[in-house]
Amino acid sequence: MIVIGTITFTEELANDVAQCYTTLPPIPDFIKTKGTYVYTHEGQDIRAFAIFSFDESRADDAAEYLKIRYKAFSSVKGLSSKVEEWLDVQDAMKVVESGDYNLSALSTNKFL
């Protein structure tokens, strides 16, 4: 499982977003980031996302950190954010192979 945090904002808010990044709490040692990526294309809002991974036994701790992290972005008026839990294909295939087809059963819903 990974968690992807995404923010979307207009170009006019770029300086405010950059300032907000400087105030974010440090990422705990038990959370690994696989990068933060930014998409810019003329005429479209800017999007940035970060990929977080951690041991599932620390999901509650990770959820608490990510809530704090993405709440910080709420100070930038006009910015939207979301945090989504993503399953890896192996876990999804286990559910499909069992005949259950209920992939939502694997979601913890801690990051909503």
Image (spheres, rainbow, N blue to C red):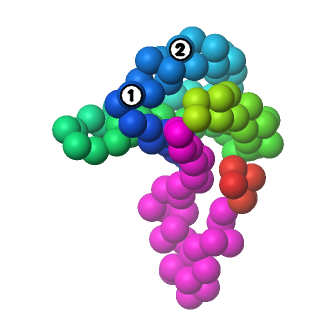
Dot 1 alpha-carbon crowd within 10 angstroms: few under 14, some 14 to 19, many 20 or more:
few
Label 1 residue SS: helix
Gap in Å between the C-alphas at discs 2 and 1? 13 Å
Q: Quadrant of residue 107?
A: bottom right
Nearer to us in this view, 68 or 57: 68
Q: Residue at x 27, y 35 (%)?
A: 40
Residue 12's disc number: 1
Image: magenta residue range: 78-107
Dot 2 alpha-carbon crowd within 10 angstroms: few under 14, some 14 to 19, many 20 or more:
few
| Residue 15 percent location from the top left of the image | 44, 18
Say if residue 13 shows up in the picture.
yes
Q: Residue at x 52, y 39 (%)?
A: 79
Q: Quadrant of residue 44?
A: top left
- Residue type pointed to by label 1: Glu
| Residue 76 percent location from the top left of the image | 58, 30
Q: Quadrant of residue 32?
A: top right
Nearer to us in this view, 72 or 89: 72
Please determine whether, in this image, residue 76 is positioned above or below residue 84: above
- Residue type pointed to by label 2: Gln
Please determine whether, in this image, residue 108 is positioned above or below residue 45: below
Q: Residue at x 48, y 61 (%)?
A: 90
